[in-house]
Image (cartoon, grey):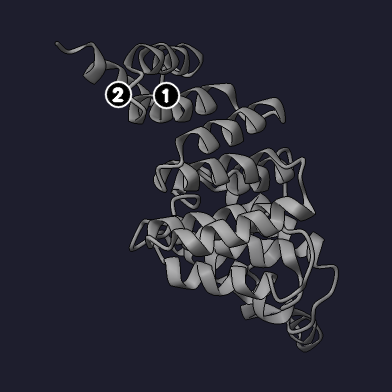
Amino acid sequence: MISSSALSRVRRRVAGCSIAVAAMLAAACASSGELTRRQECYDPDQQLAQVLAALEANRSSGCWNWEVHDPPSTCQGLQREIERLAVVCPNHVPTLMTNAVFAHDARHSEKAQQFLDRIFERPSSHPEAAVLRARIAIEDGDLPFARRLLKQQITLAPGHAGLHETYGAVLYLARELEEARSELDRADALGAPRWRVAYHLGLVAEAGGRREDARRLYAEAVEKNPAWEPAQSRLKALRTP
């Protein structure tokens, strides 16, 4: 029901960068000094930005599609580099988060969970990680865990729209419809995409038997994002006699 915004944040962070792929994949011809450096965690923000820039530069080769079972060799090298960074920089939260997002995109939920759990070993506010970790818990049917995690993180970051949106999803699935609507309204006020909130509110309305409200909300979601197929499908179903 809820999709993580982490991947789009990662892409925006490196938009406009122009780092050559060869600059990161030249380990085979690197000097011994360079090899030693690659085994150390130096300037992890810059290292991560370089790899992500190379992924962006190779978008046409399918490097962003992590569900491909046999990607081109360049993409394989970049994917391995993302994981290498998590080994040499085990405490760098952005690197762990990036690996978690990509693992989840590749449908390796257990692997994604391991990266996220490493983030939560550091007691602090990690809203994006919490959204993705809660989504995995929802997919696994573990609503109690998702609820606990989101409530904890909302306490630490009450102004994060994604936390409230995802918590609204948990409440909807738990059939706590009024509470779900309140959380989604909160997410809307905090800046969550209106088309997505409208769709989710439509689900809540439909589950509560308010078909006309649901129809109106689905229509709003389609108007604001015509490519959103789930809203189109729900709207069509409600319009069918």
User: Can you identify the residue that label 2 sits on?
Assistant: 234
The answer to which of 32 and 162 lies nearer the viewer is: 162
* Residue 24 image position (x, y, % from top left): 68, 65
Mark 2 crowd level (few <14, some 14–19, many ≥20, 10 Å Cα): some
Name the amino acid type tagged 1.
Answer: Gly
Element type at mark 2: helix
* Residue 38 image position (x, y, % from top left): 74, 79
**Quarter containing the C terminus:** top left
Corner quadrant of residue 192 = top right
Tell me which residue sits at (63%, 76%) in the image: 84
Mark 1 crowd level (few <14, some 14–19, many ≥20, 10 Å Cα): many
User: Can you identify the residue that label 1 sits on?
Assistant: 202
The answer to which of 24 and 225 lies nearer the viewer is: 225
Contact between marks 1 and 2 (CB within 8 A): the answer is yes
Element type at mark 1: helix
Corner quadrant of residue 222 = top left
**Quarter containing the N terminus:** top left
Tell me which residue sits at (23%, 11%) in the image: 239
